[in-house]
Image: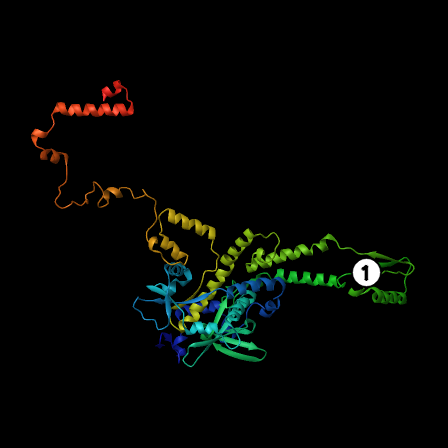
Amino acid sequence: MRIFGYEIKASIDRSETNRPSASLARVSPTIISPWEDKREIYSPENYRQLIDMYKSWIYVCASKNSNSVATAPLRLYVGKQNKDTKILVKTVKLDKQKTERIRKQGNLIPYHRKAVEIEEVIEHPFLDMIKIVNPLLTRFDLWDGTQLWLELTGNAFWYIYKDRLGVPSELWPLPPQWMRIVGSKETIIAGYVYQRDVAKIPFESDEIVHFKFYSPTGSLYGTGPLAAIMDAAIDDKNIKVFESTLMKNMGRPEGVLQSTEAISEVDFNRIKSRWRQNYGGQNKVGQTLILENGLTYTPLTFTPREMNYVVGRKLNREEIAAAFGVPMSKLTTESVNLANAYVGEHQYMQDTIEPRLRRIEESINEKLMPMYDENLFIAYDPVVPSDKEFELKERTSNLLSYITTVNEEREKMGLEEVEWGKIPLAPAGIAPLGSQAAAPGAPGSEGTPVIPGEEELTLEGALEEIPPEEIPGEKQTRDVITRIIQRVREKLSIPAEVSSKL
């Protein structure tokens, strides 16, 4: 039932909605095992271990991605089936450029394929819900936490709280380390269970929106970038522990006390205790060393192999950054200038952030938006920085080639039209081939208008109007031509022998 453009689902016949199709009945045994029917299916990854790795370079890379996703502008659109369709919520029309961008975006085509017009919705319960997510979280918290869980575990879950009319009113992100999918041989996913300690909270399948990175090991749970580089992350953690122990003088001794004579156990314990008392600990570094008779101190140095851990940390950092799609220009200032920083930002937004936004768009459009109306869909604004130099060259080329008008280029820039910008600007003398002869009113054209009361003047017509007695004879004509040639010869200083040939 639809009220004011919203799909109201006060009561749902589960027997109808969960009726298995022939394809699901055949495919479900390939996704879940027979013993997993109506039971919780555990993920192949240890999500708690992955979340515990949220430190060092893992923290830096994951938080950069989640913050970038959280700051991306999200908009709500409606596809109108015909121009006369009345929309009961407040909308604004899109300009030509935005409409073309949305229609060309591949993942949005199913939602506006049959729409003759697309408008942006600026007032809607969905927009209110993501603005005030719930009593604890803000809009930024929702997107930041969702993407952060995706980066660490490859999964994120939203619980959709609905009001009495069945309209979503609040969103509650649920930690993925406590979520379990309940299998079903009829529908593959029967629901979800949130389990922490001994408490279990069941959820229906339509109450949860599951975001995930696709996993090659299974279709139910996702695999994030952290799981792919766990070896590098653990190696980096161990190197940090080793370096920390060296700083505390616990990883290995700094030197060796040697004696030329045998030492009894009593003397050994006494020397050991006194050594720790006088020289042990960080506060006693640099103390003057006093040895007993017969003892010599030999310092221990680190081998080049042991000092190579610094290089190992850099390699681990690069591997971790590559897995999360973060360019090195965003992590360090080494060999970074304005040019490669700009290129790195462009590549980061295009190859890392934009695919993550598309994944969120598709999940919400598929799971959440049909609860309001099948004609509604969301889309993020472009986040890839534009190439200003390329745009300037393209705009100049379009204007100089008379491809576009000034107003068309101003529309792309978000500026208002001007009176003199409606037609392409071209210098004098530039016109299509043959346009002068074919243009109405041009001399010699077929469309030249004839002034009323006047006839077309031709040579034959002019001679017919002159009386025969007034037409000059042959001798008179020759005399006139001779005088004209004489005048031309004098003006141009043409020799007589040349003019005689004329």
Q: Nearer the viewer, residue 416 or 391?
A: 416
Q: What color scheme is it?
A: rainbow
Q: Amino acid at mark 1?
A: Gly
**Quadrant assignment for the N terminus:** bottom left
Query: Quick check: 240 above or below 173?
Result: above
Rendered residue at 32%/71% (across/down) = 86
What x and y, as percent, mark residue 365? 42, 68
Rendered residue at 59%/60% (across/down) = 229
Q: How dense is the environment of label 1, judged by Cα within 10 Å: few (below 14), some, or many (20 and up)?
A: few
Q: Is residue 200 left or right of residue 274?
A: left
Query: Quick check: 84 above or below 199?
Result: above
What x and y, as percent, mark residue 31? 48, 68
Residue 466 visible somewhere in the drawing: yes
Q: Is residue 149 left or right of residue 125?
A: right
What x and y, as percent, mark residue 441? 21, 45
Residue 186 visible somewhere in the drawing: no
What x and y, as percent, mark residue 496? 26, 19
Query: Quick check: 456 above or below 491?
Result: below
Mark 1, residue position = 286
**Quadrant assignment for the C terminus:** top left
User: Mark 1 falls on what kind of element?
Assistant: loop
Q: Nearer the viewer, residue 120 or 256?
A: 120
The quadrant holding residue 42 is bottom right
Q: Is residue 458 left or right of residue 120?
A: left
